[in-house]
Amino acid sequence: MKFSYSWIRSLVDGLDLPAESLERLITMKTAECEGIELAGELLAGAVPARVVSVEAIEGGKHVVKAVVDAGMYGRKTVVCGAPNCRAGITTVYVPLGSKSIAGVLSEGMLASASELGLSRDHAGIIELSDSDELPPPDHVIEIDNKSITHRPDLWGHHGMAREVAAITGKKLRNPVDLSSLASPGSPVNVEIEDLALCPRYSALVFENVTVQPSPLWLQHRLTSVGLNPINNIVDLTNYIMAELAQPMHAFDRARLQGDTIFARPAKVGESIVALNDESYTLTPANVVIADATGPIAIAGVIGGKDSAISETTTSIVLESANFNAASVRKTSVALKLRTDASMRFEKSQDPHNTVRALARALDLLPLVSPGIRLVGGLADRHADFPAPPPVSLNLNWLARKLGRKLDAAEVRRILESLDFGVAETGFETFSVTIPSWRATKDVSLPDDLVEEVGRMIGYDSIQPAPPLVPCAPSYDPPEREFLRSVRRLLAARGYNEISNYSFISEESARRFGLAVEDHVRVLNPIAAGQELMRTSLLPGIHGNIVENAKHLEDFRIFEVGHEIHKSDGGKPAERVHLMAALYSKAAPEGLLELKRVAECLASGLHVRPAEPRSWEHSARCAELWWQGRQVGRLSELHPELIDSGRAAVLDLDLALLQELKPDRSGYKPVRRFPTSAFDLSVIADSRELAGNLELHIRQFAGELAEAIEYVREFQGAPLPEGRKSVTFRLIAGAPDRTLSSPETTALYDRIVAGLTGLGYEFRG
Amino acid sequence: MQVILDNALDRIRAAATGEELEAVRVEVLGRKGVLAQLSKDMGKLNADDRAARGKFINASKQALESAWEEKKSGFDRAALARRLDSEWMDLTVPAAGVTPGSLHPITQIQWEIEDLFRSMGFTVLDGPEVESEFHNFDALNIPADHPARDMQDTFWLDGGHLLRTHTSPVQVRGMEKLGPPLRMIAPGRVFRNESVDASHEHTFYQLEGMMIDREVSVGNLIYFMKTLLTAIFKKEVAVRLRPGYFPFVEPGFELDIRCLICGGDGCPVCKQSGWVELLPCGLVNPHVLRKSGIDPAEWNGFAFGLGLTRLVMMRYAIDDIRWLQSGDLRFLRQF
């Protein structure tokens, strides 16, 4: 929202602060200013100038040499490219210094309305009439719209002027004279179908209207606050909107069918061509303004093209209405149409404001359309607006909330300067009445008044004070420390942490064998390729591997992140997973290193053969099991998924690991009797799993096996092709004695016999 | 006998190698050596001679053994010295084993701030990234069709769920879980549906904080923020509050810190204002307390939101937010 400094100054008596100081005060006490700029900078030295003569320049394309009578600057020669530059017109001369153009010395410039900041017209140089006066440049303060979302009144200059008056202790001028408003008896009737959707509809009818361009001062005001001048009638409605925050609309009365204006939900299938030349098909969720034959405006959003003000308009119906904020917002969102009107209505405008705007129009219309006449009186239908209940404000409570002492007179002064009503109702207690423009949504609780007082006394007047709080240990969710330990472990083991997006593409889901329909879908993705929520960290990690392999020979990476899975009907389930990857251009032993990482997190986990997935190296993949549950997967990426090198990946369900993590309590006594050890070399098929052999040995060894250690494998002569020898060291012992030599021999024999029975051989 | 002894001593002292020494030892001190033979012969002597012979043998044995030990340890030392010398190693060659990896800079800042809050008695809570409309908006006093919803462009998911646009919903979950009084923070990943460029990301990290107690004032909030920010930036930080609108707090503030680059004199970072907008905060709106089952007549509190991504960028002077989610190790390995 842009605010004109001169406009605000016209509404605050004796305001003499420079615009820059005012901007700072507004930021500190009301709303965030985003910047300040000078609108119509060229107007500073500009003067009206009559074009005395125009002559062509030899060799000059599209430019002419004009001699102008530039008032206090005297006679000047200017090179001008405007198509409308001709002798006899009065335009504007700007003394910009001399320079040579097309071989002619140009002593300044003739300006267009756009260059002067008076309108957006840049078709040619401006042409002034005798009555036109050049306005001075104006400072424009831009306020962050987000910071006035809750303040319907600050969408107009009068509301901001009230703030400025309160901040500076000056007096606010009221531009509205309600007494000028005509008595009832309008030639038009108003029918409101649902007062909840349209709490008020007020209108005046005028005749003898002349439609023409607005005077310069009006165009300048509108242009400097970002509104586009169109014609005097439309401009005036916009002017009042920018002043009082009340959107208005003017209909060409001759284009309306019948004398009744309806405010009602649209009928199914109704449509309207709006002022922006777009056609909108409406539903009963949209409120329309209609005449006897159909919609003439989308309520609170935009007017219809058919009934728009045009050069032939001679009679108008001026609408000043109030619409339900949520309804306007819904319509505006549904139609993807945000207008200056809808932006204001969705902030919950004050229904008392409709007639104020009409009174202001009644005063101003004769200035822009001389001879205009009011027909009849005011049309005004509205709901009952009970006065908002007063808010009881305890000054002691207020002081405790703010954390500083307060003077009752000071509090009263602040509230009254913002037009709150203040009555003392008890000891240190005020009964505060809320002005209607603050009551629609903004202020209803004593807490809201804490803000009013706090911002005006200035938050910098509050001394910081340590809070008095109980001394108690904080609750620590156990999974947080676990997740930290996982990240620390990976980082200590050489892995770099990565953070990937939670979104993946359909293509990527398919590529990694993930069914697209199993994914939670983003209804409004920011870009193609980000339409699904990830059910695996793999697509992201794979992308990291491919990208980093372009620069690096080898690397280790990991991510801890949420997988998001559909769950039946309910809220999607989130699982925290770890995915770690080890890449090397030269052949690595990445899989076994990652296996050790997994073991660090799940001591004693089991590796089981896995059915290969499409993205896996079909001979290098495994499931990881722990405590009877599958906790993850270990595999090498399929070689077709990377350009060169090998990439091993580990996927662990951290939520499950955390759940399965055993509590450590007690300890196993350290053994007191020595153990004995012997080696066993089992000959088996070369694809026999060492883990299987170990299981067999453990089974036959029984409880005397203290530990079974894998030592080495061997293939080649003298073993036949397709056979391997796997050597284990068995450490045997009993908790209560030293094993005797015959016992150890018997153990050895039992294992050999057992495995031989299963078809294995032994190497001597 | 003395001659034999002297001769043996000479040979021990003269031994040039460990093998030579061992040969002499076996010959003289061994089980079948000279001294053993002399002891064996003692039985044939009379008592006096036997005693004299015994003395002599013991004395000789001692002398020979100590000579042997001296010589032996000399050889051992020399052998050790040779071995050590032969094992010379160039320690300027590169180290073995993996070099440490790294934690993502967001993780590092997040942990640092979590620890800071824990030291002040705060609970750290996590919340889901997929949220219900209720927790993300309604419970925070942002009903449907409230224009404040425009402040946070939302990713909508099928099933009517959404990706949380802020960590504030964890406030609600925290109040529901812990009850008053409470001190909690909630760090985490949040999502906004906006296009990515050097200063905008649709995925970034925030930290939400809240304190609920019997008496919590704006003065307490300012104190707390000052303490916190001084700890984060590791130097005294000046702060100021100005009005800001967030439906879940009342009054609501934007907290600015005095520009750390120019100290308040004005520079491009603070756009010449001397102040940098850092975080939104405020006293918790009574509607929000009530929706979370807390009686606003008895309890009140403050809440604030801190942009972790923003802090990381400030600390390391990162000029392009996209690095953080890039997965590029040339960037990440620097942390």
Image (cartoon, grey):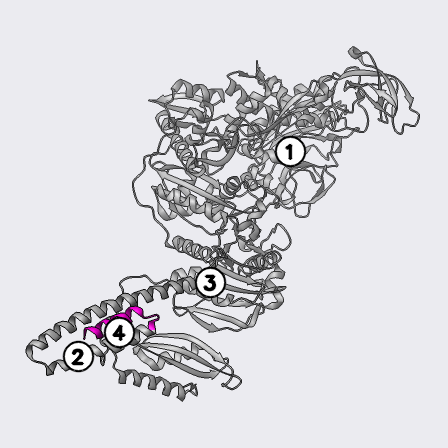
The disc labelled 3 sits on which kind of residue? Leu
Q: Nearer the viewer, residue A69 or A709?
A: A709
The residue tagged 4 is: A674
Instruction: Decide: few, some or many residues near mark 1? Use Cα within 10 Å; few <14, some 14-19, many ≥20.
Output: some
Q: Which element carries disc 2, helix, strand or loop?
A: helix
**Disc 2 versus disc 4: distance between alpha carbons?**
44 Å
Residue B25 percent across, percent down from the top left: 27, 74
Depth check, mark 2 against mark 4: the one in front is 2
**Disc 3 versus disc 1: distance between alpha carbons?**
53 Å
Residue at mark 4: chain: A
Residue B207 percent across, percent down from the top left: 46, 44
Q: Residue furthest front?
A: B3
Q: Which element carries disc 3, helix, strand or loop?
A: strand
Chief secondary structure of the magenta portion: helix
Magenta residues span: B1-18
The disc labelled 2 sits on which kind of residue? Leu
Residue A77 lies, with reference to residue A469, above or below; the image says above
Residue A28 lies, with reference to residue A498, above or below; the image says above
Do the residues at pointers 4 and 3 share their chain? Answer: yes
The residue tagged 3 is: A652
The disc labelled 4 sits on which kind of residue? Pro
Q: Nearer the viewer, residue B183 or B7?
A: B7
Q: Is residue B5 magenta?
A: yes
The residue tagged 1 is: A340
Residue at mark 3: chain: A
Depth check, mark 3 against mark 2: the one in front is 2
